[in-house]
């Protein structure tokens, strides 16, 4: 009975972690550029049955081990916004932004211009180009962002001067699973070196939506909840069985 309780508990601990992951996915179903997380589990076999009447595979106890969580970097669907500052990345690249903690990376292309004319994210962090932050002038009009990330404008009273304000810095990571989510739809890359991605393309006037499938994730939530409840019932039955056995043993005459 102790083995059954411990095995059931190991499964419940894994389900609790999986529930946290799925709930976070559901919470970000409408977050631009969000990448879902997935859980990895593995069987942990422990030779815990020591009685001589257990042979072969029956000797091993099968526990559930919460091995890891990984990022699903599948590209999300694009939605047209017609906002000239919005960009959707086609490829496995990230935008580079400057934060007080250093450079961070995002797929959220919902950009805007701050009061200083800098191109920034929705959280106000400057978006970096190949030569630093991208800054617009007060006389700039008709902003164009080409497929390779080059940002050009028309300036002057007659709007006849075509000027380049910078080129979006697009980077990729050979070991993207080592990226760490930090909130505000940003990733940090401690110990991982970003590489320029000349093959990535951007689409002006589009936003990449979250790659979370709401129907699938809600189904997982229901499945996890049901499984947790079933295991709780089983553990309660095991506990009742042990209590009954102890009570019956107590009734045996000395």
Image (spheres, rainbow, N blue to C red):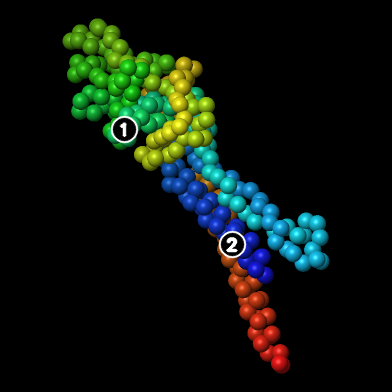
Front one among 139 and 148:
148
When asked about the image quadrant of residue 64, the answer is bottom right
The numbered mark at residue 88 is none
Query: Where's residue 140, x and y in %?
Result: 23, 16
Question: In the current view of this chain or complex, which residue is farthest to the bottom?
Answer: 253
When asked about the image quadrant of residue 4, the answer is bottom right
Residue depicted at x 43% and y 43%: 28
Front one among 238 and 143:
238
Q: Earlier in the sequence, mark 1 or mark 2?
A: 2
Residue depicted at x 52% and y 52%: 17
Q: Is residue 32 visible?
A: no
Residue depicted at x 61% and y 68%: 235
Q: Is residue 41 above or below residue 101?
A: below
Instruction: Give the Cα separation between the discs numbered 1 and 2.
Output: 42 Å
Q: Which residue is mark 2?
A: 9
Q: Quadrant of the N terminus?
A: bottom right
In the drawing, does residue 243 fall left or right of residue 211? right
Residue depicted at x 45% and y 19%: 196
Q: Quadrant of the C terminus?
A: bottom right
Query: Where's residue 41, x and y in %?
Result: 61, 48
In the drawing, does residue 1 fall left or right of residue 176? right
Q: Residues within 10 Å of mark 2 (few under 14, many from 20)?
A: some
Q: Which residue is mark 1?
A: 99
Mark 2: secondary structure: helix
């Amino acid at each position: 009975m102790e083995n059954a309780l411990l095995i059931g508990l190991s499964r419940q601990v894994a389900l609790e972690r999986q529930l946290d992951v799925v709930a976070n996915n559901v919470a970000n179903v409408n977050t631009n550029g969000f990448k879902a997380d997935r859980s990895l589990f593995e069987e942990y076999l422990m030779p815990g049955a020591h009685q001589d009447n257990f042979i072969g595979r029956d000797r091993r106890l099968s526990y559930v081990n919460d091995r890891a969580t990984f990022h699903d970097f599948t590209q999300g669907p694009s939605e047209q916004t017609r906002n000239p500052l919005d960009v959707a990345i086609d490829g496995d690249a990230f935008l580079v932004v400057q934060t007080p903690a250093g450079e961070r990376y995002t797929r959220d292309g919902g950009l805007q211009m701050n009061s200083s004319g800098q191109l920034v994210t929705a959280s106000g962090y400057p978006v970096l180009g190949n030569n630093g932050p991208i800054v617009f002038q007060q006389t700039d009009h008709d902003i164009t962002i080409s497929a390779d990330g080059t940002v050009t404008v028309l300036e002057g009273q007659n709007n006849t001067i075509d000027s380049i304000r910078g080129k979006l810095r697009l980077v990729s990571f050979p070991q993207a699973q080592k990226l760490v989510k930090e909130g505000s739809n940003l990733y940090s890359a401690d110990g991982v070196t970003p590489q320029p991605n000349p093959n990535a393309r951007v689409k002006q006037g589009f936003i990449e939506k979250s790659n979370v499938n709401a129907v699938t994730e809600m189904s997982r939530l229901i499945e996890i909840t049901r499984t947790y409840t079933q295991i709780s019932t089983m553990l309660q039955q095991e506990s009742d069985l042990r209590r009954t056995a102890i009570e019956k043993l107590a009734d045996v005459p000395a």
